[in-house]
Amino acid sequence: MKKKNNKGFSMLELIISIAILVILAGLLAPELIKYVEKSREARDMQTIDTVYMAVNTAMANEKSYREYADFSKEWTNKLEAGVSLASLMDTTEYGDLAKEITRILNEDRTEIKLVSKRALGADGNGSIYVQIRRETDSNGVVYDDETGFEIAVYAGSSKGSVIDSDFKIGIVDLD
């Protein structure tokens, strides 16, 4: 009867196997990181779209719309400039509109954050901004009657500052 030689792997074979695994990991890791970031961006766009739909739905509420259309309210001018979603949901200053948006979003917290690198911006705050403008005529004059409004929801680093054109929903020009 012959005795079998069961020595296992040689040191050279182990080093070569580990080197191959390290090279494969080095090639695959950047691709995996890209997919994770794309997933975060998709989630952020879904979040922005959800907020846009909530603001649109809140403006469809007659009480909220009438309150917004009352030109004497100081906060309507703030909304025209753009306010963070956190301040919109966290204060009673914006009246029934804020209550309706908060109810629609069904959020217990006052802030919804974005997480992707593109949405975070230079200051890294990940805030969502909401801007509601009254409809204007071709000369830029605001209509006096209740003709309509434009809504923009975007990722920003400050009021009126869109980080990336892909991270806004609503009106095209925010100038």
Image: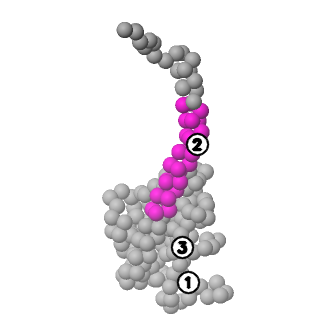
Q: For residue 63, which quarter of the picture?
A: bottom left
Disc 2 marks which amino acid?
A: Pro
User: Which-is-in-front pick, marks 2 and 3?
Assistant: 2
Q: How many marks?
A: 3
Q: Which mark, residue 73?
A: none
Residue 75 at least partly seen: yes
What residue is disc 3 on?
170
Please state which of residues 122 and 49 is positioned toward the viewer in this rendering: 49
Give me the residue at 50% from left, 59% from top. 42
Give the numbered dot on residue 30. Answer: 2
Using the numbered discs, state the Cα–Cα distance from disc 1 to disc 2 in whole angstroms. Answer: 46 Å
Q: In percent of the image, x 45 and y 16: which residue is there?
A: 8
What amino acid does circle 1 point to? Glu
Q: Which residue is mark 1?
A: 135
Residue at the farthest bottom position: 145
Q: Mark 3 or mark 2, which is nearer the start of the sequence?
A: 2
The earlier-in-sequence mark between 1 and 3 is 1
Question: Which of marks 2 and 1 precedes in the sequence?
Answer: 2
Residue 39: percent from the left, percent from the top? 49, 54
Q: Where are the magenta residues, as a range?
A: 21-47
